[in-house]
Image: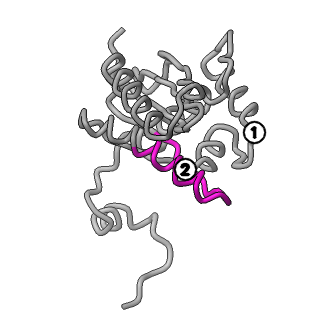
Amino acid sequence: MKFEKIILGVDPGTTIMGYGIIGVIAKKATLIAMGHIDLTKISGHYAKLKHIFERSSALIANYKPDELAIEAPFLDKNVQVAIKLGRAQGTVMIAALNQNIPIYEYAPLKIKMALTGNGQASKEQVAGMLQQIFKIEKMPSKLDATDGLAAAYCHFIQPEYTKGKSSAKSWADFVKKNPNRIKGGFKK
């Protein structure tokens, strides 16, 4: 099947990294693959980052995505955890950038809101919604996989993606082309 676009969605992690891949034809999304990368048996943070890079590069080589949608690290009370998650995310981004793949980053709240209408939805609620959307018979053993798929689907349902990209080249151009969408005025 020849897709117009392929989107790789990633839920980065240093223990489990989830991914989902969707193909787009005529503004409809089709599930291509989803899964997780288990990093629990790899000791050492840098060894995990190397494995994340290698596996991300392999996913890119195998599925040839046109875009990467990645979940942004959430703010954690534990600074060390946040740093490690940021490194994992950056490692996936470098794998994509090495292949000139555009990157789109989404906050966990935005992904959950896009899929369920509730930014505080549980992983199970997100997985359930994806199961309905894609008619998934056998759900993955790790919900990190559905989190990766959720990032890809969130990117797909963005208005500029499903309704055609905006022709505006800058904010001033957008205001000029859409005066009815601007409320209030600007004062200098």
- Name the image quarter holding residue 131: top right
The residue where tag 1 is placed is 122
Place of residue 77 in the rendered image (x, y in percent of width and height, measured from the top left): 68, 60
Judge by depth and name the residue closer to the eye, 185 or 62: 62
In whole angstroms, how far apart are the C-alphas of marks 1 and 2? 17 Å
Judge whether residue 105 is colored magenta.
no
- Which quarter of the image is occupied by the N terminus? top left
- Residue 152 lies left or right of residue 187; in this view the side is right
- Which quarter of the image is occupied by the C terminus? bottom left
Tell which residue pokes out farthest to the front in this image: 43
Judge by depth and name the residue closer to the eye, 162 or 94: 94
Judge by depth and name the residue closer to the eye, 93 or 164: 93
Q: Residue at x 53, y 47 (%)?
A: 85
The residue where tag 2 is placed is 73
Judge by depth and name the residue closer to the eye, 60 or 152: 60
Considering only vertical position in the picture, is 119 above or below 65? below
Place of residue 76 in the rendered image (x, y in percent of width and height, measured from the top left): 64, 56
- Residue 40 lies left or right of residue 182; in this view the side is right
SS label for mark 1: loop
Comes first in the chain, label 1 or label 2: 2
Considering only vertical position in the picture, is 136 above or below 9? above
- Magenta residue span: 70-90
Q: Residue at x 49, y 79 (%)?
A: 184
Label 1: how many Cα within 10 Å (few below 14, some 14–19, many 20+): few
Q: Residue at x 32, y 61 (%)?
A: 177
Q: Residue at x 25, y 57 (%)?
A: 169
- Which of the numbered marks, if any, corresponds to residue 67? none
- Residue 32 lies left or right of residue 53; in this view the side is right
Judge whether residue 85 is colored magenta.
yes
- Amino acid at circle 1: Ser
Place of residue 153 in the rendered image (x, y in percent of width and height, measured from the top left): 53, 32
